Amino acid sequence: MNDQELRDEIEKMSNKLIAIEQPLRNRYFLSCESQNAHDVCRFLFEDVRARFVIATAIDSDDCYEILYHFAYDELGTIIHIKAHIRDRENPSIESIAPFLPGAEWIEREIHDVMGIVFVNHPRLERLILADDWPDGVYPLRKEAKR
Amino acid sequence: MKISMRKPVIPVGPVHPLQEEMEYFQLTIDGEIVTDIDVNIAYNHRGIEEISETLQFDQVPFLVSRICGICSASHPLAYVQAVEEIANITPPERALYVRTIINELERIHSHILWAGLAGHFIGYETVFMWAWKYREPVLDLLEEITGNRNNYGNVKIGGCREDIKPDIIPKLLKELDLLEKKMDMLTKAVLDDPILHARLKGVGILTKEDAIKYAVAGPTARASGVPIDVRRDDPYAMYGALDWNVITQEEGDVFAKTVVRLLETLEAIKIIRQALKKMPDGPVMTEVKDIPPGEGCGHVEAPRGETFHYVRSDGGNRPVRHKARAPSYVNVPSFKASCIGEEVSDAMITLAAVDPCYSCTERMAVLDSQTNALICGFEELLRLSREKTERIRKGI
């Protein structure tokens, strides 16, 4: 696959995306709503055959963002998928771990530190917080830092 | 973590820093065979990502170099590349060569350290002694260049702190020649040893399919036939200008991982020699102004695999979000695919094969969950592993 073909593959998902940005030849930022993130990730992993790198959770002002970082190694390209979770009261998103076991840990970690529920996760137990850490306190949320 | 009350379990840990952190492995066994494995991490969670948000951009490299003593060149480099991507900074060429050389020296000493420990765990004490002896001059070289044997703190946004001074270069080349001969001998000794073939081949296989599903990185992926290497795929520093090979193996067993690491050490020597020859004169730092708002990522092929850093800036003097992923974070969960079905005596070397840090494994113990009685400890597991090697040796 060359750069243009990768771009064409990505554009196949455009009905599920809000925006496609390409600041550099080998860097993509794809924005989507949280309900579409699972399908976009699945397409990238199973059809484009991109490699899952990691996910990052960010507490933005108006929403929670989950960034799924994928790498397409043949072209040295990193594809970031930005999923926006607008419901700040009960933030949740579909888990990608059922088809991508490599994402199991990071989803548990994000659940720990940001309090985002991953629906259909095979085992959403505590991973990195201490056993005696109080329930309902999420250290990477802005409210916890104040 | 739930502990099964019926089947015997082997708790390994909780102080077991496979990724320079403490970890707890719970092996469920049926007779001699491992039937399940569970991993618990973060006994020593330090909150590096959050601390990073309280530091200024130029202070963060010193923080992230402390994520891991052995990968203390890779983490800061990945972070610095992320910031350079945001601010569109191009460091001077000489600085890029210095980064290449330091990172390859790091790979050499890390791989040799692993080879020594792997030898120790299967009862090859000579390999342990040799390997650690050969590693020592590499650490001395790093100290001469950067001032530190580990935690070099050499990479900065826009370049490097210390240059490689011309008077070190002859010594560097001489040590590389000596090291190459020794590593060549060690590699041939390992590849020709019938006992090692019998002991390590077919043990702890991670299939290509599982390697992709678990998204593993580095030698763990390359030994399973997944030909990924950030140095070639998304060239950073000066790797794109140098001539070297990505080492891959198809088998996915412990032997394949050993071969990948040993041959990579020889490739690293090749890279450093070329870099020293091609390195132009000039400064190693460029002027850095404010970091604009934006987001970027950097990834570096650390000895254990891809180290990935994501940074977001709002135009202030600190990152608003900084995510760091060490390669073991994706390599360790793959034990679920490689360890199940193995014998207990093979579990140790299988767990070791993704290149963990073993300094605290003394807490390893085998428990019978019904009585909670200690069946055997670390010494016993080491004995089991070595006895298996001895049986093979006698058989041959």
Image (cartoon, rainbow, N blue to C red):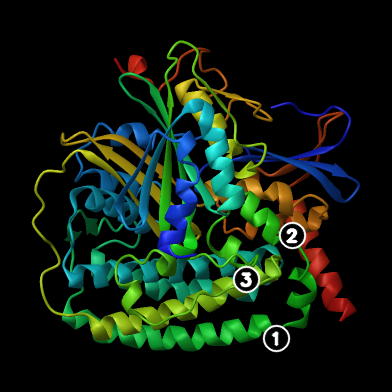
Residue B22 seen from this side:
no
Question: Residue B114 appears at what percent x and percent y?
Answer: 55, 65
Tell which circle, 1 or 3, labels the residue nearer the N-terminal end: 1
Read off the residue under disc 3: B258
Is label 2 on the same chain as label 1? yes
Residue at the location (79% across, 69% down)?
A: B389
Is label 1 on the same chain as label 3? yes
Q: Nearer the viewer, residue B354 or B380?
A: B354
Read off the residue under disc 1: B192
Name the chain under label 2.
B
Rate crowding at label 2 as few (under 14), some (14 to 19) or many (20 or more) other CA atoms within 10 Å.
many
Q: Amino acid at mark 1?
A: Asp
Residue B146 seen from this side:
yes
Question: Residue B108 appears at what percent x and percent y?
Answer: 45, 71
Q: Amino acid at mark 3?
A: Thr
Tell which circle, 2 or 1, labels the residue nearer the N-terminal end: 1
**Residue B255's quadrant in the figure?**
bottom right
Q: For the residues carrying marks 2 and 1, which lies nearer the camera in this image?
A: 2
Read off the residue under disc 2: B204
Q: Is residue B367 above or below residue B77?
A: above
Disc 2 on helix, strand or loop?
loop
